[in-house]
Structures are given as structure tokens and as C-alpha cells.
Image (tube, grey):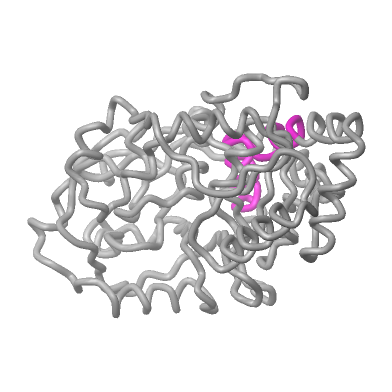
């Protein structure tokens, strides 16, 4: 199994980096894949340095410094979306360090991180005044020129098939999701199938499919198909940021709905079709990982991104479907075979936590860096 082999090879990877510290020059936008890696590194004992201010992706653990040349670190990590201070690489002479880039951004059909950067550069304010860049809450998104920045290693979440350069990085399971887990057994889960409507053509199509199938009574069991919100939980440390942010940074993504997680904890099977229909390479989001963390069996549409280096499909091969018909067939099979469903659900939960928790993802991340260094 690729997943098990990658997991085993990754164990203890933190030991091979001398300083157990990184310099984080991040995006000013919420990036789920980045947060998982930062959390995992922190739990592995790494120091996360940020320059001059905390960041939306690392506020829970970053150590703010005024000059990176006064501290020791193993590599420089950056995110891709708007607000990344590429100018810091020149200002602090950081090009001599190992440079890692995480492209955890949405992919509307673009080839690589450079095309995404070009899109953001054409869409957002270009290189505003320094007093704007120094704010903790920005009035608008902006970008800086790359100024010769070229990463040594790139990790990509919505990875194109045919991309031989970057390394796949899943969003994974963060500790925030786990705090809502109620430990319910099958008999305490009264919703057979749940699908949550959201942005993206794949979700809209699946919503319509389940709605029609439920009305025609060809969808088995008790089904929830729609949006669930309410009873929001805001992390205490960032309440002031959430209140001040007008959606620019997306601090609202840190706010979680207790009603939503209660639904997941009542659900046996969570249906996840990805975000955009093929061929657009846009599959990953927080949804499947929230569902796994809540103990659901996730029936997932075969990803239209290249996950071969760390395949989520190996959590439960049975629970992968390729078509609407196969989805319905598997729903009926699971509904009629409850003992099989429960065994499969429990095994999937165990594997998801083992392979995709933030520590496991961080170790995989470090192992891939080490492999590239010594290649």
C-alpha cells in the first residue's frame, strides 16, 4: 500500500533537520494545506518564526521576530496566495537558504504555481505602500513582484496529472476538527447519508442528483442533503481578527459551526464529490477531513487531482466511486449491509487519523524535503 509505505518512510523525519525551526514568509490568506503542515511541525517541536507580526495560518504557534538573521532555521517556507512578502528574500538575503513553497490554492484549470501567481497579480492591487503591508488586517488583497524568487521544492494540493515537478500535499486533519468528535457508535448515528452543498460544479451536481433520487425514493435511508450552519465557535485568540476582517483574509474559515459538526457526528456515510467536475483539477477541501475526523465513512468521488504520492483513496478503497450510478449502488449496498458498513467506517476512521493527522502530514512533508535534498 502506497500510503502505508509513505507513512513508514516518513516517521522520525523531524530528527534530520538540525535546528528544528523554520522561517515562515506566508500568504495573508487562509490556506488549509499550509495550516496543517504548520500545526504538525509545531507539534513535532519545531519553532515557527514569522517576521514582524503573526499570520492567519500560524497565529496559534508562531514566534514573531524582527530580523530573521538573528535566529537559526532549517528552511524558509512560503504560501502562494496574496500578500506573500517575496521582497523579504532580497531584504534579508534569504535566497541562500532552502526555499519551500506550498501551493494549497484553488485550481481553476491552471498549469502550475507560476500561472496562479500571474492570475493573482492581474487580479489584486499591485505592491501597495509599506504601511499597508505592515497591517495585521488588510483593507484589500495585494501582491508583490516575485523579484527573482524561485522555490527549490514545491508542494501542491490541487495537483495536475502530468505535473512531475511538485509534490502532492493533502489538506489533512487538523486538531480543530478533532475537538468536535463525539465518539458515537453506529446505533447513535441516525443519519445514513449526508451531502453538504457548497461552491463548485461537482457539489451542485451531486446535490441535484441526491435531491431527485430522494424524491423518487431511489436513495435509501435517512438523508441530509443541503447546508447546515449555526452555533458558531470562534477561537478565543483570534476573535478580534475575525471581528475586524471583512472577508479579505478569510478569518471566517477558522469559525466552525457546532451544528455542522453535530450533523457529521450523527452521520454514518458522508458523500464527497470533490469541488469542480473534471477536467478541472480541483478536488480537495476541508469537508472530507472534517467528516473523517467526525467518524464518518466518506464515500468519495475518485479525485481529479494527482494524489498518487499520498493517496486518500487507500483509506477505504471500497468507498471510492467513479460515477453517479456507482455512488447509488454503493449507498444501497452499505444501507443493506450495516455490519459491513460499521466495520468499514471504523477502519476508515482509524486509517484517516493515522495517516492524515497534522503530525503525519508534517512528517511526510519533511521526508519529501529530505529526499529531494539528498536526491
Q: In which image quadrant can residue 65 be found?
A: top left
Residue pictured at 38% horizontal, 37% vertical: 48
Identify whether 116 is placed above or below 69: below
| Residue 110 part of the magenta segment | no
Number of marks drawn: 0
Pick the front one: 245 or 310? 245
Identify whether 311 is placed above or below 337: below
Pick the front one: 238 or 169? 238
The answer to whether 305 appears left or right of 239 in the picture is right
The x, y position of residue 323, in whole percent, is 79, 66
The x, y position of residue 220, in whole percent, is 79, 45
The x, y position of residue 177, in whole percent, is 53, 32
Specify whether residue 1 is in view: no
Pick the front one: 276 or 21? 276
| Residue 352 part of the magenta segment | yes
Q: Main secondary structure of the magenta part?
A: helix
Where is the C terminus found, in terms of image quarters? bottom right
Pick the front one: 297 or 367? 297
Residue pictured at 59% horizontal, 74% vertical: 280
The x, y position of residue 243, in whole percent, is 20, 39
Q: In which image quadrant can residue 206 be found?
A: bottom right
Q: Which residues are magenta?
A: 349-370
Specify whether residue 336 is in view: yes
Residue pictured at 56% horizontal, 68% vertical: 201
Residue pictured at 31% horizontal, 63% vertical: 82
Amino acid at each position: 500500500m502506497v500510503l502505508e509505505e509513505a507513512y513508514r518512510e516518513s516517521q522520525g523525519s523531524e530528527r534530520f533537520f538540525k535546528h528544528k525551526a523554520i522561517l515562515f514568509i506566508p500568504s495573508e490568506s487562509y490556506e488549509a494545506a499550509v495550516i496543517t503542515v504548520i500545526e504538525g511541525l509545531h507539534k513535532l517541536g519545531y519553532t515557527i518564526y514569522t517576521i514582524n507580526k503573526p499570520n492567519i495560518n500560524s497565529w496559534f504557534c508562531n514566534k514573531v521576530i524582527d530580523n530573521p538573521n538573528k535566529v537559526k532555521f532549517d528552511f524558509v517556507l512560503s504560501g502562494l496566495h496574496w500578500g506573500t512578502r517575496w521582497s523579504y528574500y532580497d531584504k534579508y538575503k534569504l535566497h541562500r537558504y532552502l526555499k519551500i513553497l506550498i501551493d494549497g490554492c484553488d485550481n481553476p484549470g491552471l498549469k502550475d504555481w507560476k500561472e496562479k501567481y500571474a492570475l493573482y497579480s492581474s487580479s489584486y492591487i499591485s505592491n501597495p505602500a509599506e504601511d499597508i503591508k505592515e497591517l495585521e488586517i488588510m483593507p484589500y488583497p495585494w501582491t508583490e513582484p516575485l523579484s527573482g524568487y524561485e522555490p527549490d521544492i514545491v508542494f501542491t494540493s490541487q495537483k495536475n496529472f502530468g505535473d512531475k515537478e511538485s509534490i502532492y500535499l493533502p489538506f489533512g486533519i487538523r486538531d480543530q476538527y478533532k475537538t468536535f468528535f463525539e465518539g458515537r457508535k453506529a446505533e447513535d448515528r441516525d443519519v445514513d447519508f449526508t451531502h453538504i452543498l457548497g461552491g463548485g460544479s461537482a457539489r451542485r451536481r451531486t446535490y441535484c442528483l441526491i435531491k431527485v433520487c430522494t424524491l423518487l425514493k431511489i436513495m435509501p435511508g435517512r438523508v441530509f442533503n443541503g447546508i447546515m450552519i449555526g452555533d458558531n465557535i470562534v477561537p478565543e485568540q483570534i476573535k478580534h481578527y475575525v471581528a475586524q476582517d471583512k472577508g479579505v483574509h478569510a478569518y471566517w474559515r477558522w469559525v466552525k459551526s457546532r451544528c455542522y459538526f453535530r450533523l457529521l457526528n450523527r452521520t454514518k456515510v458522508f458523500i464527497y464529490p470533490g469541488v469542480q467536475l473534471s477536467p478541472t483539477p480541483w478536488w480537495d477541501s476541508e469537508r472530507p477531513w472534517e467528516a473523517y475526523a467526525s467518524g464518518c465513512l466518506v464515500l468519495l468521488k475518485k479525485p481529479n487531482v494527482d494524489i498518487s504520492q499520498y493517496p486518500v483513496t487507500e483509506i477505504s478503497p471500497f468507498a471510492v466511486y467513479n460515477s453517479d450510478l456507482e455512488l447509488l449502488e454503493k449507498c444501497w449496498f452499505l444501507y443493506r449491509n450495516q455490519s459491513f458498513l460499521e466495520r468499514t467506517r471504523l477502519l476508515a476512521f482509524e486509517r484517516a487519523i493515522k495517516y492524515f493527522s497534522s503530525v503525519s502530514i508534517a512528517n511526510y512533508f519533511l521526508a519529501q524535503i529530505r529526499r529531494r535534498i539528498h536526491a
